[in-house]
Image (cartoon, rainbow, N blue to C red):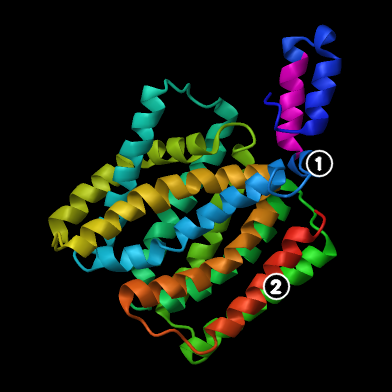
Amino acid sequence: MRANDSATTATAIAVNAPATSPRTAATAAATAVEAPEAAGSAGSAGRTPAGRGALLAGLGVASFSLTFPGTAWALEGMGPWTVVMLRSVLAAVLAGSALAVLRVRLPERRHWAGIAVVAGGVVLGFPLLTTLALQTSTTSHAAVVVGLLPLTTAVCSALRTGARPSRTFWVASLVGAAVVLGFAVQQSGGAPGRGDLLLFAALLVCAAGYTEGGRLARHMPGWQVIGWALVLCLPVTVAGAAVALSTEPLRLTAHAVTGLLWLAAGSQFLGLVVWYRGMAVIGVSKASQLQLAQPLLTLVWSVLLLGEHLPPAAPATALAVLACIAVTQRARG
């Protein structure tokens, strides 16, 4: 264990070093991983495991905020099925190469069911449903609807893992979700369309994938969680890519290639690596609330990269959302 992981733990190891066996040290390390909030209770936020976990989860959110603009770029030269399948194949090649080079052992049998949920929700379900939705929805509108993902993930985590966040956490989460939902309704004119239904379905499958991924990341590195999920889907995505390339038009423009590469490397692999690690440290519920900022970040990218119009209500919505995030991060779990 590194000395800077926990001042309390480091001191305990130094005092008891003569009587500490490898098995005891391993047990202590596992306990530290499964009790992230307790380990991060001392010191300033930037130096504690909790602070580092929030930073990692925040980096994941920043990466995800570029997913919809990247998808819009990719759709300029490719069909929706081509985009979804190729991004997963490329990400699987990246992840599989890392697993092979580092000679990572196969996960334990008890973890494969969870990895399958990650694969179905994060590798296949969410990318496919959101890509289909973006054929009729703008990136800014889709980003705001997906702003309900933090609350969906927190609820899924509570049901799946038995987590019990405080009442303050739930109140702030509901307020943040209501602000985002109100913004979405105002932007859509009050009537959900086909794209909205696809986005709501994407919320459910993604929340399940995030919950299982965050749980598994307590037992294995986050990059291995998404890595094995991508490899598990490879037979499906390779076959799907072959069919899509033979049936959908393909124009390899600069935007299309750049968008696809970002989706594969950034959104589908590297972003999920830091995201799952962050969830493992600070918990699925708290990490999920950081995603309340994602729709606002995506709005900024949609203006800068796609030339879309920034809604007048966006700044006020952003401030309200940031306030809700601050409350959820300070609320006791």
- Counting from the top left corner in percent of width and height, residue 84 is at 32, 56
Q: In the image shown, does 266 or 106 lie closer to the viewer? A: 266
Gap in angstroms between the C-alphas marked 1 and 2: 24 Å
Task: Name which quarter of the figure residue 89 lies in.
Answer: top left
Q: Residue flagged by tag 1: what amino acid is it?
A: Ala
Above or below 3: residue 275: below
Local secondary structure at mark 2: helix
- Counting from the top left corner in percent of width and height, residue 50 is at 71, 46
Which contiguous range is marked in magenta? 24-35
Is any part of residue 78 visible from this angle?
Answer: no
Above or below 244: residue 232: above
Name the residue that disc number 1 marks. 38
Residue at the spot 81% in from the left edge and 44% down from the top edge: 41
Q: Is residue 31 magenta?
A: yes
Give the numbered dot on residue 323: 2
- Counting from the top left corner in percent of width and height, residue 44 is at 76, 48
Residue at the spot 66% in from the left edge and 51% down from the top edge: 284
Q: Residue flagged by tag 2: what amino acid is it?
A: Ala
Q: In the image shown, does 214 or 69 lie closer to the viewer? A: 69
Which mark is first along the chain, 2 or 1?
1
